[in-house]
């Protein structure tokens, strides 16, 4: 197949006399094949080298040259800045790419000039500060305008504290043992905000949101848990953000309602002939108990291992009195192999909801019905 050059040679040969010899034609074509691409390259380079105007939006972190201070953005509240850029198009494109990359890895910073090293509120000239930043200074691009033109920051002493990791109190009650690796974390930020978030001998809690399943099954396990999340605007950071937690979880507590608990009168032998009349049903209805599943199960079913009873104690001072009111004491009846049925106090881990008072009369001289 003939090449493009051959086709042009054929064309010029047909108009021979008006143009010149075939040799001359080839020379012209050869020259054009060199000059035209070169001209295009020069034109493209000139276009890219020509100064143009463009815009960019950034949200930089604010940094200090003084390591004992830290700055927090007050205005604009979001920290977002709009920049007007001027320079060769190729260099602007390169700079915008670098800004985007730094924004992705959170390394895009606005470093305050050394003059702003005193505590308090400061106003920063954004365009002037950025134009002196090494990234912009070496880019061949100028920032001609920033919106807003000024950034207001508050400069505070930098506080760095080492605090222990802890479990929230509502969760700690259900755990038999817990340890953390590492046991402490570093809290860093503006001193007023660190002191407000972690006053005195504070601890840093783990974040248990949406992690209920990690703390419901009995047993020992090691899990990685995040620490509590702080508001971004506080400029307070916790490092590391996660810790390993080794936890031993006992059987979960259970609730159970006993429909009827009988009222039992307890009195001294000397009061054997007194008559105690309980007004109303001789039982307490719907008594709620709470405790470890292994203990609560003993009170369940139609023939439980343990039974509750409400003990109404009578003293000599009660004899002959009417319309007395007293809260019975909830106690446990259990069958023992050697001593038969035994009346005893509830296990410490079993809790019962408070019950109401019982109305009763104590008459003397007649046997109890």
Image: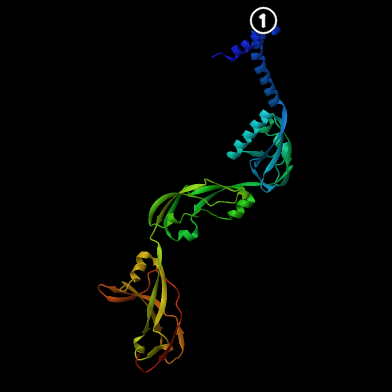
**In front here: 38 or 11?**
11
Alpha-carbon neighbours of circle 1 within 10 Å: few (<14), some, or many (≥20)? some
User: Can you give x and y, in whole percent of width and height, for residue 273 in the image?
Assistant: 35, 91
Q: Quadrant of the N terminus?
A: top right
Q: Quadrant of the C terminus?
A: bottom left
**In front here: 92 or 315?**
92
Residue drawn at (41%, 86%), measured in percent from left and top? Answer: 315
Q: Which residue is mark 1?
A: 21
Q: Can residue 139 be spotted in the picture?
A: no
Residue drawn at (39%, 89%), measured in percent from left and top? Answer: 276
Asked whether, in this view, residue 307 is left or right of residue 353, the answer is left
Number of numbered callouts drawn: 1
User: Can you give x and y, in whole percent of width and height, for residue 24 in the image?
Assistant: 67, 6
User: Can you give x and y, in whole percent of width and height, for residue 138 in the image?
Assistant: 67, 29
Quadrant hosting residue 313: bottom left
Quadrant hosting residue 200: bottom right
Tell me: residue 86, above or below residue 68. Answer: above
């Amino acid at each position: 197949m003939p090449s493009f050059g051959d086709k042009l040679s054929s064309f010029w040969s047909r108009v021979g006399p008006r143009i010149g010899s075939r040799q001359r034609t080839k020379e012209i074509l050869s020259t054009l094949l060199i000059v035209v691409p070169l001209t295009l390259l020069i034109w493209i380079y000139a276009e890219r080298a020509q100064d143009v105007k463009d815009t960019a939006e950034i949200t930089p972190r604010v940094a200090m040259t003084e390591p004992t201070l830290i700055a927090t953005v007050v205005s604009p509240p979001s920290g977002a800045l709009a920049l007007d850029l001027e320079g060769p198009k190729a260099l602007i494109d390169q700079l915008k790419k670098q800004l985007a990359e730094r924004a992705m890895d959170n390394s895009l910073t606005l470093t305050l000039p050394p003059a702003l090293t005193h505590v308090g509120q400061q106003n920063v000239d954004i365009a002037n500060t950025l134009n002196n930043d090494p990234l912009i200074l070496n880019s061949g691009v100028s920032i001609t305008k920033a919106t807003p033109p000024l950034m207001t920051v508050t400069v505070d002493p930098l506080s760095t504290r080492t605090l222990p990791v802890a479990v929230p109190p509502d969760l700690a009650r259900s755990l038999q043992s817990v340890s953390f690796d590492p046991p402490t974390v570093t809290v860093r930020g503006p001193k007023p905000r660190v002191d407000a978030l972690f006053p005195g001998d504070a601890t840093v809690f783990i974040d248990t949101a949406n992690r209920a399943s990690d703390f419901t099954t009995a047993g020992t396990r090691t899990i990685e848990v995040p620490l509590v999340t702080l508001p971004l605007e506080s400029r307070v950071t916790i490092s590391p953000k996660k810790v390993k937690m080794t936890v031993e979880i006992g059987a979960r507590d259970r609730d159970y309602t006993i429909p009827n608990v009988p009222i039992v009168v307890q009195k001294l032998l000397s009061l054997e002939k007194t008559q105690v009349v309980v007004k109303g049903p001789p039982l307490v209805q719907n008594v709620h108990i709470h405790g470890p599943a292994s203990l609560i199960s003993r009170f369940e079913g139609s023939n439980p291992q343990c039974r509750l009873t409400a003990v109404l104690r009578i003293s000599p001072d009660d004899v002959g009195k009417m319309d007395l009111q007293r809260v019975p004491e909830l106690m446990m009846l259990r069958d023992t192999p050697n001593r038969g049925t035994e009346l005893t106090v509830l296990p410490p881990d079993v809790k019962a909801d408070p019950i109401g008072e019982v109305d009763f009369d104590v008459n003397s001289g007649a046997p109890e019905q």
